Image: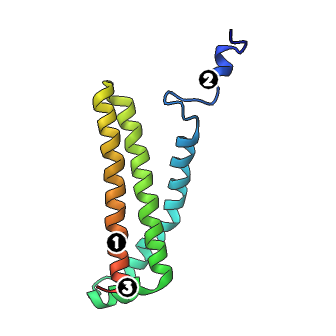
């Protein structure tokens, strides 16, 4: 027999039994995206009209490549977390929900890997 109250058994756990970790991850990636996005907009405004060689030279600097990769990772993770909430809230059948969540996570990882590969290719050449 359980001596804990129903409230104490579920405290800190959401419907998916993940607690507030998902909520915190969404907020932290959102906070990280603010300066990264502002940096990206500022940097790209300086490269308006630049050719591929100038873009390669810009990405080729270590800090720019690192910040681009951070922007990609934070952006993809933030988007995946947000879309996961939408799927969990509005897809009620367990089968389609599970398939949608798996496809979402695979798609986010695939897009992140493709984008990171593009940054690395621009950084280190072909």
Above-or-below relation of 35 to 44? above
Q: In the rendered view, does 116 fall on the left or right side of 2?
A: left
Residue at coordinates 51% horizontally, 55% vertically from top-left?
Answer: 29
Q: Is residue 55 above or below residue 92?
A: below
Q: Residue at x 54, y 56 (%)?
A: 31
Residue 53's label in the rendered image is none
Helix, strand or loop for disc 2: helix
Classify 10 Å Cα crowding around label 3: few (below 14), some (14-19), many (20 and above).
few
Name the mark on residue 10. 2
Residue furthest to the top: 1
The percent position of residue 56, horizontal first and vertical second, equals 34, 86
Image-quadrant location for residue 12: top right
Which disc is residue 124 wearing?
3
Distance, label 2 to label 3, CA atoms, is 50 Å
Q: Which residue is mark 1?
A: 117
- Figure label count: 3
Q: Earlier in the sequence, mark 1 or mark 2?
A: 2
Q: Counting other residues with Cα less than 10 Å from the Cα at mark 2, is it few (<14), some (14-19), or many (20 or more)?
A: few
Where is residue 104 shown, x and y percent of the image? 33, 46
């Amino acid at each position: 027999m359980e001596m804990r109250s129903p409230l104490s058994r579920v405290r800190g756990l959401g419907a998916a039994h993940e607690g507030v970790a998902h909520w915190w991850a969404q907020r932290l990636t959102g906070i990280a995206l603010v300066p990264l996005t502002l940096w990206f907009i500022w940097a790209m405004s300086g490269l308006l009209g630049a050719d591929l060689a100038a873009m390669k030279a810009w990405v080729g600097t270590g800090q720019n490549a690192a910040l681009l990769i951070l922007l990609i990772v934070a952006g993809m993770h933030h988007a995946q977390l947000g879309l996961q909430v939408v799927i969990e809230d509005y897809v009620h059948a367990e089968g389609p929900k599970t398939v949608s969540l798996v496809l979402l996570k695979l798609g986010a990882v695939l897009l992140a890997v493709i984008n990171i590969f593009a940054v690395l290719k621009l950084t280190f050449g072909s």
